[in-house]
Structure formats: C-alpha cells, structure tokens
Image (cartoon, rainbow, N blue to C red):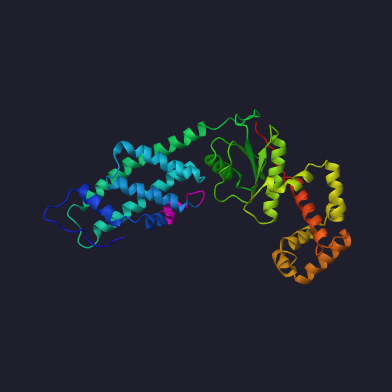
Amino acid sequence: MSSEAPPRTTTDPSGSELLMRAVRAVVDGRDLARRVVTEPTTAQWLSAPPDLPAVTGDIELWTRVFADDVPSDEVPRCFEERAAAHARRGTPPGDAVLVQHGCVNVLVGAVISWLEAGRPHPRAAEARQTAGAVALRTLQTATAAIARSYRLAAAARVPRTRDPLPESRRWCLAVAVREGETHRLLERFRAANPQASADTDGTTLTCFTSQWPTVPEGFGPYGVAPVEGCDTDRAAGRAGLAAAAARRYRLDHVDARQLLPLLAASDLDPDECDAFLTACLGPLHTADGNEHLMETLRAYLSHNLCTTAAARSLYVHRHTFAYRMRCIRSLTGLDPDRPFHRLRAELALLLREASRPGGRPRPRLA
C-alpha cells in the first residue's frame, strides 16, 4: 500500500474523483485479502477460516465498485457470482456476508490511510464521506444478492425422500464426523451440492448426489460408492467401508470400486463375517477389555511393521509395545510379519471397523 500523500494539481478533484484515485493507489488484491482473513472484527465470527482465493476475488470486486468501474445495474449480478464462488467452496451464507463486511473495513481503512498520509488533501473529508456512502449502499446490495443466491440454490435441492432421483446414476458419500461438527459439515456439504440428499446419525455423514459429489475443504477421509439401481442401503454400506479404508490408510478418500474384493467380503452373511473375524482375531474380537491390543495391532500394520513408529503413535514404550505384540501372537496365532497373516489381519480390521456402530452408515432420507 502506498503511503505517499495525494498529489496536488492546479485543479483539485472532487471527493468522488479523489476516492477513485485513492482506491487505485492502494489496490493490492492478495495483500488486502490476507488482511481481511486476519481482521479480528471479522475473523472471530467466522465458523471456519475463509478461502484466500475467494476473498481475493471479493476484494477485487470491491475495489472496482469503489473506483466506479462497475455499472450500478451490474453490481447485484457481480455479488451473486461471488456468492456462487463461496458456495462452491462450502462457505455458509453467513460467513459469505461477513467476508464482505471485512472487505469493506479493510479497503476503507486503506483508503483513509492514503488520504491522511503526508499533508491531507483539502477534499479528503469529502472523499471519506463518499467512501462511507458507497460502502453502506453497496453492502446492502451485496447482502441481498448473497442471500438471494443461496436461497435459490437451496430451493433447487431435490426433496429428501425415498423416491429415486431422476438421474439413472447416483453416488453415495460417507465420512466420519467429530462430535460438535456435524451441523457445520452438513451445511457446508449442502451448500456445495445443492441437489444432494444428506443426513447424519451423529457419527457419520451420509450423502447421496446425482453427480460426483463436490467435497468442501476440511472434510476428513471419506468414501464414495455408486448407487446401483435403487439400493441405497448397499451403497451406504460400501461408501462406509471405503471411508474406513481411507481412515485406515490415511488417505484423502477411497472410491469403493477400488475395493471390489473387499466389498464382496462385506456382503457376507453377518454370521459368516463374524466367524471370519473370530477366526482371525480370536479374543481380540470376542472378548471385552482387549481394545488396547486391537489398537496395538492396528498401529503396527498402519506403520508398516515398524515397532518404534507404532509405539510412538500410541505414546507407549517400545518394550511395552513389543510385549503387547507377543500377547497378540499368542492369543490369535497371527504373525503380521508373514504376508498371508498380514493380509488376513488387514482384512479383518477393515471389516470390523466398517461393521461397528458409526463405521457403516445407514441412509436416512426421509
């Protein structure tokens, strides 16, 4: 931002002309956007940190409005486009409006600093008054445009019923959610996927979309599965298993079609599945009080059979970890260092995680 005083000319500009000159002097989209993101009066009320590229687009629009480069009848449409950009990133409507207020605060502050640098211009007070009028008038227009854009997107959603969607091919997404984050993630997903059906049981968010789902930033590992016919239960189970695999192997997401052999195993009769888990895991699966051994086995496999890294991940001494592994070998007969035993253990852990409450979501579309 320039700190030089406004140049004096033989013919002093009007307040509006001086404002345009000031805006063009201080404009630096990315620098001003970073200030918007960190501005206390805005940032403290946002539900999540705003997306910097989106805020940069906002501040660039505001500088054009202040510089009178946007026709007045085009301003509502421009802010509707900004609202759509925020919605694609999963930004709640309230946050989108707050960001506009932050843009105004930062831009007006930069303009005033420029006007007051050095020897104040005789028309500086008039320029400040003009800036305030433009800010107030445009904020009203921007707020209405953003609300209208989000409202129209919400009205376009397909009703959440058990009737099949008109498109022949649909997708199911499943993601585990932390306590207290359910509502925020659900709202962000619906903003990014206006026609989606989405619900949660408190631990898992299950969503059905007509197109490949748009996943907002901040989502944890998730699984995606195609819906075959109208069998949403089967798709939800497969997406849940894919999400379990993504969490298990610390991946961003897993497409269920990459796990077809595992999906076939997940379709086993419950008694057959339980018999397989018992045969692989023994008392670790059937008896209470062995969850620490289950976590030990999971950490050992997850850290590629490295005792030191696995012990560190569980905050236990490596000798304690080695003792637990001896117990696991004794109770189950598994030796994860042998490839076939490791394959059985990996498959058992995935099936067990997917079958636990919250691990395999059931769709509730009513």
* Residue found at x 31% / y 47%: 64
* Residue found at x 35% / y 47%: 61
Q: Which residues are magenta?
A: 36-48
Q: In the image, 301: left or right of 15?
A: right
Give x and y (percent) for residue 362: 71, 39
Q: Is residue 211 visible?
A: yes
The one nearer the camera, 265 or 19, is 265
Question: Does residue 198 show up magenta in the picture?
Answer: no
* Residue found at x 44% / y 52%: 53
Name, please, the residue furthest toward the left: 10
Q: In the image, 155: left or right of 271?
A: left
The one nearer the camera, 322 or 248, is 248
Q: Is residue 206 visible?
A: no
Question: Does residue 37 show up magenta in the picture?
Answer: yes
Q: In the image, 263: left or right of 288?
A: left
Based on the displayed image, in which of its 4 quarters is residue 207 positioned? top right
Based on the displayed image, in which of its 4 quarters is residue 307 positioned? bottom right
Give x and y (percent) for residue 51: 47, 51
Give x and y (percent) for residue 153: 49, 35
* Quadrant including the C terminus: top right
